Amino acid sequence: MATLLSKSQDVEMDPACDDASSNSSDSGYETITVGDEWIAIVMKYNEVEAAKNSKVDLCFLASIWSPIASEDRLKIMLDWHHWVFLFDDQFDEGHLKEDPTAAAEEISQNIAIMGGDAPRYTADSNPIRYVFQRCWDAISEVSSPEMQNRWIDQHKRYFAQLLVQVDQQVSGQNFIRDVDEYMNMRRGTIGVYPAINLTEYGSNINLPQHVYENPSLQECMTVSADLVILVNDVLSYRKDLALGVDHNLISLLMEKYGLNIQKAMDEIGNMVNQCYRRWYLALAELPSYGEKIDREAMRFVEVVT
């Protein structure tokens, strides 16, 4: 997940980012250090690990998703970004990569957090679940039932495709599937869909469910996920090779279709161009719902862009 959720760096950045990533806060359950310093304490990082994590600058990533987020909401967005990288790495290159039973159990426990059926986790008992539970507590406290359901549904979608990824890894299907099958699986595992809902929270977007479900907006979400997949697979190709990670489109195009690396890159370039075409066609089909809702719909489109 080296470039998960990446966006253009030539964008507006939330001025609250510096505060969210480094200051102390008493807005949570107790007075805590927030951001990179907080996650280093939770995960018990040594100095080298903490410095490596800070260098990633996840607050920058969160702030360009939602440049207008309040400091408190940006902090939760930052916590979620820390969580999703830590959680995902367990399935990409960690102990859950080839263990379907343990993977299913881990996902079940995270779903229970959103259902209110989980124990209260601490940084000592289970640090990764603790971070996710803290995010869910904050978001569910201020979100509408519709928004909470979107959050739950899109995380379940993400979790389900992680299980597909593990099953395909174990059964050796990584280079048997075709491009469409690969993209369908990766749309779930790349993490864009829950990130979009997180940004709805950060930007305080109020989009009615029937508008959210419009095929045009759903296609915009899919295009956004596809673009992140394509960028991710190009930028993380060498790292994936070094770590033995097979779910990379370049590797699939070379192994299954016999393309050399340049032709594989050219094919990805063609797919990127198609994404732009799909995006504009989807927007052209988006109906008007009246001035107030249209304004929220355009704010949502900006999030997805």
Image: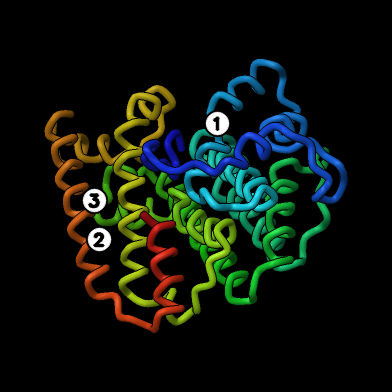
Helix, strand or loop at mark 2 = helix
* Dot placed on the residue nearer the N-terminal end, 2 or 3: 3
Residues tagged 2 and 3 counted as in contact (Cβ below 8 A): no
Name the residue tied to disc 1. 57
Please identify the residue farthest to the top as the structure is shown: 48
Quadrant in the rendering for residue 42:
top right
Front position in the image: 245 or 183:
183
Residue type at numbered disc 3: Val
- Residue 205, percent from left and from top: 53, 66
* Dot placed on the residue nearer the N-terminal end, 3 or 1: 1
Quadrant in the rendering for residue 40:
top right
Please identify the residue farthest to the right as the structure is shown: 30
User: Depth-wise, is mark 2 or mark 3 nearer the camera?
Assistant: 2
Quadrant where the C terminus is found in the figure: bottom left
Helix, strand or loop at mark 3 = helix
- Residue 94, percent from left and from top: 56, 34
Mark number for residue 179? 3
Q: Is residue 208 left or right of residue 109?
A: left
Residue type at numbered disc 2: Trp
Q: Determine whether 61 is above or below 196 in the image.
A: above
